[in-house]
Amino acid sequence: MTSAMTQLLNLNADKREEQSAMRRFFRERKISESLKVHIWHCYREQSSKKHNTLLQTDVKYFSHMPQRVKMQLARELYEPAVKDFPIFAELAVLQKGIVSKICNTAIMERAGTPLEEIITSGVQAHRAIVCTYGDIYYESRLLSA
């Protein structure tokens, strides 16, 4: 059996185990039918559309590259999005190289999934969110009320 087949079997086993745990949890905690249906819908939606975008952290070699090359990569990945922020565009004029430093030290890459709440009403944000690939949909409860 190839390692790819073994990996696929393990993924399917993990998924079955997780689904079994969810069913048991719902049964033991007597979760309402309407909430179970909603949770299953979210689960299927998210698991069927996991991100296909390869992240920088998915490539092990990148963590072993020379720092100078890592900096170039970060600059190419993030600088266009960072420069879209007026404050950083102004900083770039005032201090040469600052945007590059920001790209290398202050940005964390992550991929989201459909239905994932990245902004939660009533919860204080501690980071800025910049979408560099795909789309983010935001609906304000204040405007829809």
Image: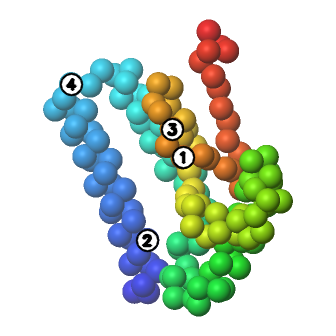
The residues bearing labels 4 and 1 have C-alpha atoms spaced at a distance of: 37 Å
The answer to whether residue 83 shows anywhere in this view is: no
- Circle nearer the viewer, 3 or 4: 3
Q: Residue at x 65, y 78 (%)?
A: 71
Tell me, for residue 125, which label it has, or none.
3
Q: Which residue was labeled with disc 1?
A: 127
Residue under label 2: 8
Instruction: Return the residue found at the far left.
Output: 28
Q: CA–CA distance between discs 1 and 2? A: 35 Å
Residue beneath the point at 54% across and 46% down: 127
Can you identify the residue that label 4 sits on?
A: 30
SS at circle 2: helix
* Residue displayed at 33% across by 61% down: 14
Q: Is residue 117 left or right of residue 132?
A: left
Q: Please, what is the three-letter code of the amino acid marked with disc 1?
A: Arg
The Cα atoms of the two marked residues, 2 and 4, are separated by 33 Å
The single residue placed furthest to the top in the displayed view is 145
Q: Name which residue type carries label 4.
A: Lys
Q: Nearer the viewer, mark 1 or mark 2?
A: 1
Looking at the image, residue 118 sits to the left or right of residue 79; the answer is left
